[in-house]
Amino acid sequence: MERRWIAVCRLSIVLVFFGWWEWAGRLGWVDPLLFSYPSRIVGLLRDMAADGSLWPHLGWTVAETVIGFALGTLLGTALAAWLWWSRFLARMLDPFLVVLNSLPKVALGPLFIVGLGPGLSAIVANALAITVIITTIHIYNSFREVDPNYIKLVRLFGGSKRTVFVQVVLPATVPSIVSSLKVNVGLAWVGVIVGEFLVSKQGLGYLIIYGFQVFNFTLVFASLFVIAVVATVMYQAVAWLEKRYTPKDKPN
């Protein structure tokens, strides 16, 4: 019952917001040139979908985001495993990870463009720079929080470090790894869109910049709307994975 009420409240907030926006735009309470309104945005998206100009930009950005998201998660998990494996390495790199995590990684975008060229590689590298460090820290901390008694038990029965990791640490931290995917969805989108701002000649980030340049703010809002929809779909897919692979708490 509570879940239904929450869903009703969420839907009401969305309807009230878009209804007010539409009304305010049509009545001139807000400048429609700057803020447009929902029916204009939907109309533009319908026209772009009909003439086929939307799909290449959407496909390009989604492909970049999925690549950056997947590589960031895999590389972050591998680095976390490496740190868990080597206590010396973990202690040595700990301050560097903290510093790197605090840096504004988007500032590295121009360096990636110079180093990798203006294309897919630079945009994916930008997404990786944003996702890898936070994924590594999150998953490594999850590895460290595994109950040491389980590890001692496997050790007592002669289990090697590899056995401990594969049979105890990794299975115990699957929920944390899956939950980190939720964070990476948003971070990968940020990295890709910023990369497209800097270098791309297609994609939703490019459409946003182009909209600003020609004062077509309806195009800007339409691109943001598409990003919100696709990001929500990716987030729900990750939430499904979390529900599927995270064990539910059992009553005592």
Image (tube, rainbow, N blue to C red):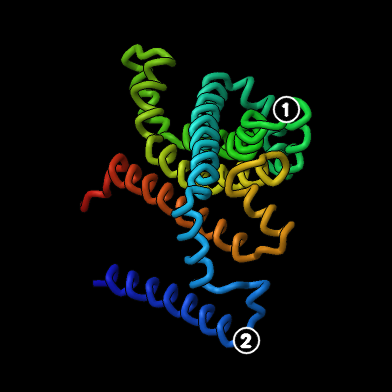
Q: Nearer the viewer, residue 150 or 172?
A: 172
Q: Residue at label 2? A: 29
Q: Residue furthest front?
A: 51
Q: Can I make out residue 144 in this image? A: no
Which numbered marker is on residue 117? 1
C-alpha span from label 2 to label 1 = 45 Å
Q: Nearer the viewer, residue 252 or 28?
A: 28
Q: Position of residue 196 (x, y in %)?
A: 66, 43
Q: Amino acid at mark 1?
A: Gly
Q: Which numbered disc flags the more N-terminal residue, 2 or 1?
A: 2
**Quadrant in the picture for the N terminus:** bottom left
Residue at disc 1, secondary structure: loop
Which numbered marker is on residue 62? none
Q: Position of residue 144 (x, y in %)?
A: 50, 33
Q: Amino acid at mark 2?
A: Trp
Q: Nearer the viewer, residue 6 or 161?
A: 6
